[in-house]
Image (tube, rainbow, N blue to C red):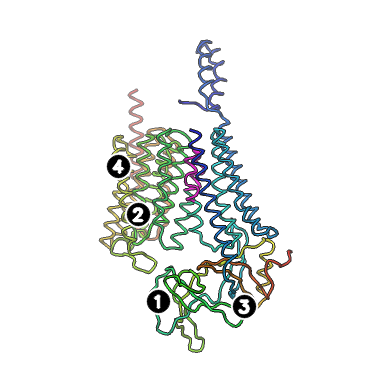
Amino acid sequence: MKTPVLILLGALVAVQFAVLVGMINGKERILREGERVLFRTQPIDPHDPFQGRYVRLRFADDYVPLDPGETTGLNRRDTVYVTFATDTNSFVRFNGWRTAPPTSGAYLKTRYLGEHRNWNTGTRTSTADGFRVEIPFDRFYMDEAKAPLAEQAVRDATRGTNCWAAVRILNGKAVIEDVFVRGQSVRTLKRR
Amino acid sequence: MRKVSDGHRLWLMSELPVLEQAGVLQPETSDRIKNYYASNTRGGLHWAVVAFAVLGALLIGSGIILLFAHNWDTFTRPTRAVLSVCPLALGAALSAAAVLRNGGTAWREAAGLFHALAVGASIALIGQTYHLPSDMPDFLLTWALLVLPLPFLLRAGGASLVYLALACGWAFSAQDQYGQAVAFWPLLLPGVVWLARLIRADRQSAQTHVAFAGLMTALCVGTGAAFERTVPGLWIVAYSALLSGAGLFGLCLYGERDGWNNIPKTFGVLGMAVLAYLFTWSEMWRGIGWEHLRHQAQYRPWGAWADGGVTLALLAGWAVAAVRAFRRDSAETVTLAAFPVLATACFAFGSLTASAESLNALIFNAFLLGLGVMYIVLGCRNVKLRQLNGGMALVSLLLVTRFFDSHFDYLARGLVFIALGAVFLTVNLVMARRKKQKEAAL
């Protein structure tokens, strides 16, 4: 009775390890081989009971622009593949989308979150100018002593110009590499 | 084998010399009693050992999670990746040791609980190391699937409870994030299989009672989370069938026992009382039924079919339990069996007529009053203080609520209260007179 149970337990533990090692390997490969791009961001500092303190990242450019009158026919949470281009400061902006993975060039696999509306303060009207997408890297985990410092540093910096996230992207998947505030990595902030 | 607790044995041992001295027992009989209970006593320390082992595993597991959650950024990424799988390695080693050493309940429960928590800790740590996004349903589902076989392999109820908690957590987060959680039902199946095995092995064991409590909690919580709510008020029928079915199943399985010794009946009776109280409010019956189907973007077109299927399945379970329970012809069985019939009829009536709210509420006011009175009578007849107090509590709750309820006119409330008071006093007088007559006849 003991041997079959041990064999089954061994098989279960092997599956458990395989899943964890698969997760680690997938992310390591993206960090090794992925294309490095920068996203403008505004971090805030919450915490998670399992994973500790993290900096939550809000992205200003979280939408794909559409031509006037263009519609997507997508439903909320539909999978979408978005392509991007970099501006003169090397920051990323989404510029196109597909429902199937592009055969060439870098792209990000994400989900459709509904239309993006632009508010015109002059005319006090809002118009749809694209669609919002889920950013699949919204957390940057930090040492619990440094996370509040990062938040403070971000508060002192000007939104949209001095904070960015360095991200590696490979085959549509992304892993965040570092977050910078005024050019300084939040990892290098001094402990209190 | 039937075993008594150590506390009861000690009391009996202290009584034996007294009985011997009084001439009630012969010394030989007293010795035979001593010998019998020496081998038929449940170790008093047993559950304390299990409880301490489980608490220890729980605290160490949680401590390790918190320790890692500090996020030691002095470690390199590869070091942290290796550290991430350490909790799982430790959990696996403990489980293997429990199997190899043929560990007792305490060992297996502690190992199962620690292993189940360790899987979650390892996934969370990898998420922390690689800054994975907040995908709670995905995290909980991966964790649940990876711990699913643990209760069966280690015969550990704690791991099963962790699994059920994860399935419920998944149902809530999936409903929130994806807008549907139908997969909760297949996720619940291993919990049902685990309980069925325990019932077959020993339905009286504490492990079976704990598993029953876990599954009933998961069913009550998970049904609410997984329900699509496309048909307003359908939950009234579903929950009535679920709780009544549980109560009737408890009556089939454990008879008239109650409390901890009959978990399904306890859930059924308490749930029925809570639901019946909720149904005494007319708001509960407003805008219900197929006429008010929800079509907004967050409701799925197939939601009505999914909820309808779940409700039918629960009603089928209730019907089977009712047929089996009707072999014991008690007032409690009839009341439990009648509850979903009444709730379904009121739901159908409310669906057809907009003016049914007040009548449905009145019907359940009468039902709750009847339920309270039934338990008062049963409590008096069976000399069970728990039933008597429960009945009194139900009647008092109903009366206090209706006294302050502004939905009914002062005049109507006043007349009903006076009429009810008169009925209670009359019954009291009749009972007192009968008691006197009986005493005189004796």
Q: Name the spot of residue B378 as percent of width and height, x first.
A: 37, 37
Circle 2 residue: B236
The numbered mark at residue A159 is 3
Q: Amino acid at mark 3?
A: Arg
Q: Amino acid at mark 1?
A: Thr
Q: Does dot 4 land on a helix, a strand or a loop?
A: helix
Marks 1/2: CA distance? Answer: 40 Å
Location of residue B31 with respect to B140 vertically, above or below: above
Q: Does dot 1 land on a helix, a strand or a loop?
A: loop
Q: Amino acid at mark 2?
A: Ile
- Over which residues does the magenta segment extend? B144-163
Q: Are marks 1 and 2 on the same chain?
A: no
The chain identifier of the residue carrying mark 4 reads B
Q: Does dot 2 land on a helix, a strand or a loop?
A: helix
Q: Are marks 3 and 1 on the same chain?
A: yes
Circle 4 residue: B320
Q: Name the spot of residue A74 as percent of width and height, x first.
A: 40, 72
